[in-house]
Image: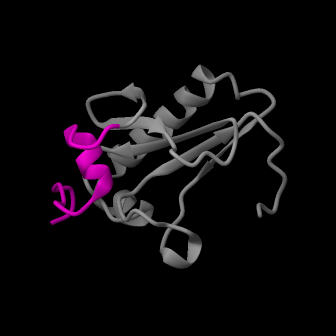
């Protein structure tokens, strides 16, 4: 069921404290931690503590929680001092887009040039 922890989900295990992570923010609804394979000097993952498979499912099932994820992404950008010159928030949806953990999460990237299109 959406929102319920999934036994086989890496991010649910991180939320439960079963798998370690370098946590940078922890609120009642959201957990943020450093990516283990950073693609920029700042690369933090922001996840809802409740399990939703992707950003679209999160937005439909828990719009307030989706807003929490985005708000915390902005807070992390400020905390990491990437608001100026800029940062990127990325949600990958589906394996073809690079999603490897099917628990909704935002990547907060900054600290280097982030030209468009990415790649």
The answer to whether 68 appears left or right of 16 in the picture is right
Q: Residue at x 49, y 76 (%)?
A: 95
Magenta highlight on residue 86: no
Q: Is 38 drawn above or below residue 82 in the view shown? A: below
The picture places residue 35, in percent across and down from the top left corner, at 52, 44
Main SS of the magenta part reads loop
Q: Is 51 drawn above or below residue 77 in the view shown? A: below
Q: Residue at x 62, y 24 (%)?
A: 80
Residue that sits furthest to the bottom in the current view: 96
Q: Quadrant of the C terminus?
A: bottom right
Task: Indicate the quadrant where residue 74 lies.
Answer: top right
Q: Nearer the viewer, residue 13 or 5?
A: 13
Q: Is 56 drawn above or below residue 41 in the view shown? A: below
The picture places residue 32, in percent across and down from the top left corner, at 42, 36
Q: How many marks?
A: 0
The picture places residue 10, in percent across and down from the top left corner, at 31, 55
Q: Residue at x 54, y 29 (%)?
A: 76
The answer to whether 88 appears left or right of 85 in the picture is left
Which range is magenta? Answer: 1-20
The picture places residue 6, in percent across and down from the top left corner, at 18, 60
Q: Residue at x 32, y 38 (%)?
A: 20
Q: How has the structure been colored for display?
A: one colour
The answer to whether 20 appears left or right of 8 in the picture is right
Q: Quadrant of the N terminus?
A: bottom left
Task: Indicate the quadrant where residue 14 lies.
Answer: top left
Magenta highlight on residue 19: yes
């Amino acid at each position: 069921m959406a929102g319920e922890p999934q036994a086989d989900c890496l991010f649910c295990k991180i939320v439960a404290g079963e798998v370690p992570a370098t946590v940078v923010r922890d609120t009642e609804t959201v957990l943020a931690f450093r990516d283990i394979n950073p693609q920029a000097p700042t690369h933090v993952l922001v996840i809802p503590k409740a399990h939703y498979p992707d950003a679209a499912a999160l937005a439909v099932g828990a719009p307030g929680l989706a807003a929490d994820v985005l708000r915390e992404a902005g807070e992390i950008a400020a905390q990491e001092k990437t608001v100026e010159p800029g940062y990127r928030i990325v949600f990958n949806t589906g394996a073809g887009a690079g999603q490897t953990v099917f628990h909704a999460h935002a990547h907060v990237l900054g600290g280097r040039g982030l030209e468009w299109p990415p790649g």
